[in-house]
Amino acid sequence: MAESENQSVSRRTMEVVTALLTAGAGLAICYGSWQSGIGWAETGPEAGYFPFYVGVLIILGSLVTLLRTLFFYRREGEVFLTMERARPVLGFFLPVVAFTIVSLLLGLYVGTALYICGAMMWQGGYRWWISALAAVVVTGLFYLVFEIGFQVPLLKGPIENWLGIY
């Protein structure tokens, strides 16, 4: 048996994990909606009325998937993902996680510039100066479109504050 076959995740496991994650998302939606109000006011439904029931539907769908997987799943051992197949997925997913962390710590503009530059260099094979130039141009366009054009402030960090962009 090849090494990559030993390091795999079954389809059944992934269906259980996905059902639990989507049920958690549904619970979060219901909780947030409940805080906003899920009843009827004199002017009609409160802000959380419709999202609450969307959350309930997500939870019900997740429970159906979970029960179906636990009690009616018959294809034991069906491989969902091997380490060989996971490498390209992780090559996309891990930079997105890094982008999120950097954006929360240093601001969205810095995170965007670093993500674009890194993705172009390592995944696209571009030279560093082309990647850096593209990152600066795209980040500058984001600033012009959101901050100036739409007047929607994006998440800023200490570098933007240091530069006087607030």
Image (tube, rainbow, N blue to C red):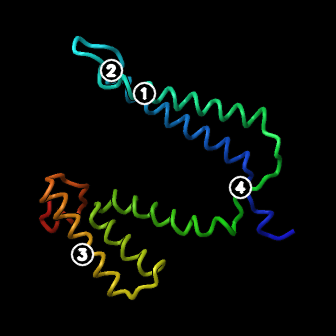
Name above or below for residue 73 compared with residue 56: below
Element marked by disc 3: helix
* Mark 4 and mark 2: Cα distance apart in space: 40 Å
Name above or below for residue 163 compared with residue 24: below
Q: In which quarter of the image is residue 137?
A: bottom left
Element marked by disc 4: strand
Crowding near the residue tagged with mark 2, few <14, some 14–19, many ≥20 C-alpha atoms within 10 Å: some
Residue at the top extreme of this rendering: 42
Of the image marks 3 and 4, the number of the one nearer the N terminus: 4
Name above or below for residue 156 compared with residue 63: below
**Residue that carries the numbered disc 2 in the rendered image:** 37
Taking depth in this image into account, of 46 and 106 the one nearest to the observer is: 46
Q: Residue 31 carries which label?
A: 1
The image position of residue 85, as x and y in percent, is: 67, 66
* Mark 3 and mark 1: Cα distance apart in space: 40 Å
Of the image marks 1 and 2, the number of the one nearer the N terminus: 1
**Residue that carries the numbered disc 3 in the rendered image:** 137
**Residue that carries the numbered disc 4 in the rendered image:** 80
* Mark 2 and mark 3: Cα distance apart in space: 43 Å
Of the image marks 4 and 1, the number of the one nearer the N terminus: 1
Q: Which mark is residue 140?
A: none
* Mark 4 and mark 1: Cα distance apart in space: 32 Å
Is residue 20 shown left or right of residue 69? left
Is residue 97 shown left or right of residue 74? left
Query: Between tags 4 and 1, which lies in front?
Result: 4
Q: Which amino acid does label 4 sit on?
A: Phe
Name above or below for residue 18 compared with residue 162: above
Is residue 40 shown left or right of residue 126? left
